[in-house]
Image (cartoon, rainbow, N blue to C red):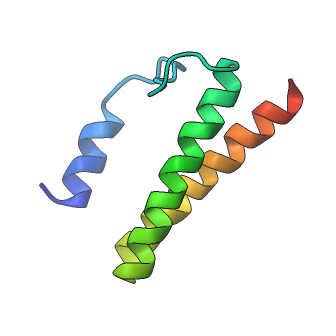
Amino acid sequence: MSSRELKTLLDQVADTREIVLRRAGTWSADYDAWSDARDDTLLAYASWRSSPTAETYAVYRAAQDREDAAQDTLALR
């Protein structure tokens, strides 16, 4: 499946404004969302550094944006 096909498929999924967390509630949902996003960012960064392509960089930047948004939410609590 190409990136374009995947994006088209995902665009058809309704946004329920729900998040899925990997870990059982450790502190709070906001903290867990940030922690999951941070883990994803670290993995994406490592992937980009080991294979520096436009696609791996885009994945890293998307993960970083999600981590930033989660951190902003956490800071409001």
User: Residue lying furthest right in this view?
Assistant: 76
Q: Locate residue 20, reporting x and y percent.
A: 46, 23
Q: Locate residue 48, reporting x and y percent.
A: 42, 74
Location of the C terminus by quadrant is top right
Q: Determine the residue positioned at 61% across, 39% down.
A: 35
Note whether 76 is above or below 39 in the view shown: above
- Viewer-closest of 16 and 63: 63
Q: Determine the residue positioned at 62% across, 20% down.
A: 26
Note whether 30 is above or below 40 in the view shown: above
User: Residue lying furthest front in this view?
Assistant: 26
Report whether residue 53 is seen. no
Q: Quadrant of residue 74?
A: top right
Count of picture labels: 0
Q: Left of 74 or right of it: where is 32?
A: left
Q: Left of 46 or right of it: where is 32?
A: right
Location of the N terminus by quadrant is bottom left
Note whether 32 is above or below 48 in the view shown: above
Q: Locate residue 63, reporting x and y percent.
A: 53, 54
Q: Determine the residue positioned at 48% across, 17% down.
A: 16
Note whether 13 is above or below 2 in the view shown: above
Q: Left of 36 or right of it: where is 6?
A: left
- Viewer-closest of 50 and 56: 50
Report whether residue 54 is seen. yes
Q: Locate residue 62, reporting x and y percent.
A: 52, 56
User: Residue lying furthest left in this view?
Assistant: 1
